[in-house]
Image: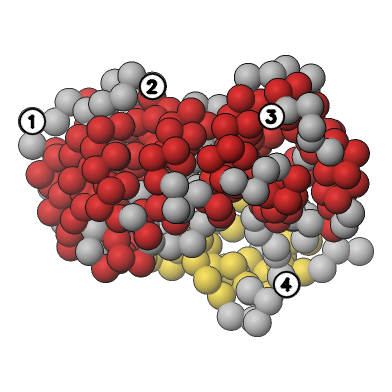
Amino acid sequence: MAEPLIKQYGADVPQAITSMIAAVYPAFDSAGFVAEVLDGFDTLALMARGQHIARALRRFLPENYPEALAILMASIEQPHGRDSSLTLGSFLYLPHTLFVANYGLDHFEASMAAQHTLTQRFSAEFSIRPFLEHHTQATLAQFRVWATDPSEHVRRLVSEGSRPRLPWAPRLRQFQADPTPVLDLLELLKDDPALYVRRSVANNLNDIGKDHPELLTRITQAWLQDASPEQAWIVNHALRSAVKRGEAGALKVLGYGQAAQLAVGQVQISPGQVVMGGAVQISFVLTNSQNQSQRVLVDLAVHYVKANGQTRAKVFKLTTLELAPGQTVQLSKKLSLAEMTTRKHYPGRHPVAVLLNGQAQPLGAFELVPGG
């Protein structure tokens, strides 16, 4: 089993930060700082470790925020000695961004300049959000400037930082209620040359669609008019969750608005009883029995048993098809039931359905049983 990523964020992180700060601020109490950070450090989750270091920085750097921030920003230019290939290598600067978020709200200009620099080393998508909440118009104005910044990391911050439902972050409820200011920013970024930025634009639209499905349909429909391949990709990626939810508007935008008239047969779910940690093979045949071609989006919905005994569907993308009259195609999916960090399995009956243009047709079920 692979080593947990949090193992890359151990005692060497505060030690690296200490050496960087001491190089530009000799009065820094390096021993005291490291001792305070390491007290209880191993019991904390990743983001909590970042917050813990940020609080210690506040106590050990000068009380004056602009002075403390200047020292911290000067320190990031110093060598840190950590392996740059680490998956969490850039998380070295997580405490720096959290320091700005926690203590910099009363110093807007200095904090914005710091985040412009920090996001090019480690994303400031988390630390920018308190500024959007407390200095909404000023931060939006800064975002409009950054939308044309030479750095793709800064341009991505405009989209990623304004996502209403950004993972690992508090929601931006004012933009959940009225996403108009966010949409104005996305209009500036939808033709960005960097896929890194365009992916963020799509993710932001995906967030907006969870609260405003009809608005998402209107926006993506407009964006598809004479769209470049890059913009068409944004639309497809932005609609992925809506399509999984079977929303008619999203399916129509992508050209799957008509109900699929297909025969489903030769269903096999093998084995019918699966031991936890094993796998199940699901296969079936689709036949277009109509006298005209049909364009079909095919997904698979597996209703996983949850801890409370209820089931919840997870949708897996399968394929898109253009079936000629009378054409038959066989499709299959091998489903792993090994334990994952993102999904815990529970014993019980797991119904399976195929989604044809968003409409479910039951295929059957498999029984998941404990191992041993």
Q: Quadrant of the C terminus?
A: bottom right
Q: Residues within 10 Å of mark 4 (few under 14, many from 20)?
A: some
Q: Nearer the viewer, mark 2 or mark 1?
A: 2
Q: Which mark is residue 89?
A: 3
The kind of residue tagged 2 is: Ser
Q: Nearer the viewer, mark 1 or mark 4?
A: 1
Q: Secondary structure at mark 2?
A: loop
Q: Residue at x 44, y 38 (%)?
A: 110
Residue denoted by label 1? 226
Q: Nearer the viewer, mark 2 or mark 4?
A: 2
Residue denoted by label 2? 151
Q: CA distance from mark 2 to mark 1?
A: 28 Å
Residue 322 image offset from top left, x and y in percent: 24, 38
Residue 336 image offset from top left, x and y in percent: 67, 50
Q: Nearer the viewer, mark 3 or mark 4?
A: 3
Q: Is residue 22 above or below residue 369?
A: above
